[in-house]
Image (tube, rainbow, N blue to C red):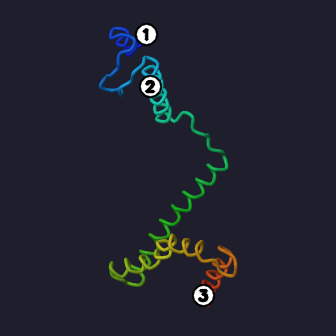
Amino acid sequence: MSRYERESMEEGAGADITTPLMPRMSTIEEANEHARAVEAEERGVEANLKGEGEAEESGAAQVVYSFIATLQAAEILYGLAVSYLLKDHFKLSPGGVAMIMGILGLPWTLKPLWAFLAETFPLFGYRRKSWIFLSSAGCVASLV
């Protein structure tokens, strides 16, 4: 027998059951139902904290995550090499190196704005294909 049931039996069957941790309830059934709901919620929280009930990641997802981590590491090493090249070979000041590295990182900063524009304003009836073609043509034009 739970503490709530004992308290309700002492006070009488029709008495209001009130504790500091529970809202005001008029019947034993309501109190028991509330106690079961609280216990179920606590079990769910404990299960989530332990990592139970979560879906297992597939092997393909783990390969993709590993590939992304490898690319991020390569980007860090690339940035380090570029900054030393600018500093040692081109004899730039730290401010100049920071400015060039900031300009090189600008496209990644503007990606969310670019995605918003591509999704909101379709070109030639396509939302993504035309923007990809346009940006690829811009890259080729900048290389020529």
Contact between marks 1 and 3 (CB within 8 A): the answer is: no
Which structural element holds mark 3?
Answer: helix
Mark number, residue 12: none
Secondary structure beneath label 2:
helix
- Extreme front residue here? 14
- For marks 3 and 2 on the same chain, the one whose residue lies earlier in the sequence: 2
Q: Judge depth for marks 3 and 2 and give the one in front.
A: 2
Q: Callout 2: few (<14), some (14-19), or many (20+) C-alpha neighbours within 10 Å?
A: some
For marks 2 and 1, give the CA distance: 15 Å
N-terminal-most mark, 2 or 1 = 1
What residue lies at 35% left-to-right and 26% top-to-bottom? 24
The one of 66 and 40 positioned closer to us in this rendering: 40
What residue is pinned by disc 2? 34
Of all residues, the one furthest to the bottom in this rendering is 144
| Residue indicated by mark 1 | 1
Residues at badges 2 and 1 in contact (C-beta under 8 Å)?
Answer: no
Q: Quadrant of the N terminus?
A: top left
Callout 3, which amino acid?
Leu
Residue 104 point in image, percent of width and height: 47, 77
Residue 28 spot, x, y in % from top left:
43, 17
Between circles 1 and 3, the one closer to the viewer is: 1
User: Which one is in front, 58 or 100?
Assistant: 58
Give residue 78's position: percent from left, percent from top. Answer: 50, 70
Residue drawn at 62 percent across, 40 percent down: 56
Q: Looking at this rendering, what residue extends furthest in the left direction?
A: 20
Labelled disc at residue 143: 3
Please name which of the two marks, 2 or 1, marks the residue nearer to the observer: 2
**10 Å neighbourhood of mark 1: few (<14), some, or many (≥20)?**
few
**Which quadrant does the C terminus fall into?**
bottom right
Q: Could you tell whether 130 is left or right of 113 in the image?
A: right
